[in-house]
Image (spheres, helix red, strand yellow):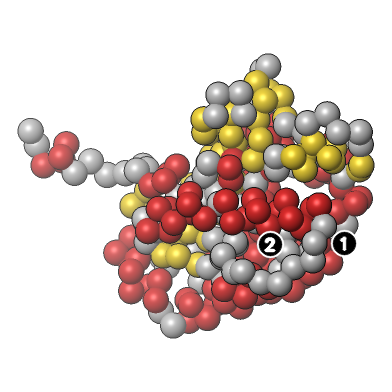
Amino acid sequence: MSVHKLFKPKPYKLGLALSGGGIKGLCHAGVLKALEEHAIKPDIISGVSAGAVVGVLYSDGYSPDEIGRLFEDMRFRQMTKLKIPDGGIFSIEAFEGFMKRNLRSRTFEELKIPLKIVATNLDKGVLKIFETGDLIEPVIASCSIPVLFTPKKIDGINYVDGGVLKNFPVSVIRDNCEKIIGVNASPLVADEYKLSVINVATRSYHFMLKANILPDKEICDFLIEPIDMGNYSTFEVEKGREIFELGYTSTKKLLEERMFYQQSNDINIYA
């Protein structure tokens, strides 16, 4: 067997994996802004929940600043509405309408950067990776937090938030990329909280994600995990601008310390 066949090059030089995290996922847009300023742009993106939202907008051609502005004035109650429970407390229909109005692409194939979106098949309890065909429904499925939102039905199958099984989708693209930047917007911090149905549900859900995040953190070539993100709650939408800036400044600091350059110079991502 030839050496070429033994060491077949991977299809993508640089991959970017974006975690879930609710409004904390806006830090992904700040991270992207800092990466762009250092001439770093991914060849493929994987995203789950909030990471899927930022990932799809970026792949669709939105700049990091444009993504930040899209959500800067959004309020959780404007994107969702209370309903009689039939699988979820809130409807996600308003958010789905928001995505339909703002996304230019309608299929994965139309995106400027290849994208993989992770959701959970609720009927069979397995991971589902969407990467072809219709774009909107997989994004909504990936964001449908169990109990809070009604599952998204696609082709007769109920899907919920991909974070249930894979909140940090590094392994989804690991075998296809020479290097991977992983951005975890949900560092595990046991902070103070107020007792309410939503706070207890989201806090419990947040802790549940710990087991499936750790293995993916280990296989990143470069991990960006702003620890101060633990100071924000999942639905603290009024803090969107702060969260964006935190992602930007923390990544900029890492890059200026040349940590990433030392690990990734061999793939010429600065060219």
Residue 62 visible in the picture:
no
SS of the residue under disc 2: helix
How many C-alpha atoms fall within 10 Å of the one at disc 1: few (<14), some, or many (≥20)? few
The x, y position of residue 179, in whole percent, is 37, 56
Q: In front: 125, or 131? A: 125
Which residue was labeled with disc 1? 73
What crowding class fits label 2: few (fewer than 14 Cα within 10 Å), some (14-19), or many (20 or more)?
many
Rendered location of residue 210, percent (x, y): 52, 55
Residue 120 in picture, x, y percent from top left: 58, 34
Residue displayed at 70% across by 39% down? 146
- Residue sitting at 37 percent across and 43 percent down? 176
Q: Which mark is residue 254?
A: none
10 to the left or right of 31: left
In the image, residue 20 above or below residue 109: below
Quarter the N terminus occupies: top left
- Percent of width and height locating residue 18: 56, 54
Total labels: the figure holds 2
Res 161 → quadrant: top right
User: How far is mark 2 from mark 1, CA to CA?
Assistant: 15 Å
Q: Nearer the viewer, residue 199 or 168?
A: 199
Residue 73 seen by the camera: yes
Residue position for label 2: 24
Residue type, mark 2 in image: Lys
Say left or right for 258 vs 150. left
Q: Is residue 68 above or below residue 262?
A: above
In the drawing, does residue 127 fall left or right of residue 72?
left
Amino acid tagged 1:
Asp
Residue at the image position 87 percent from the left and 45 percent from the top? 80
Q: Secondary structure at mark 1?
A: loop
- Kindly indicate the quadrant of the structure image that contains residue 203: bottom right
Which of the two discs, 2 and 1, labels the residue nearer the N terminus? 2
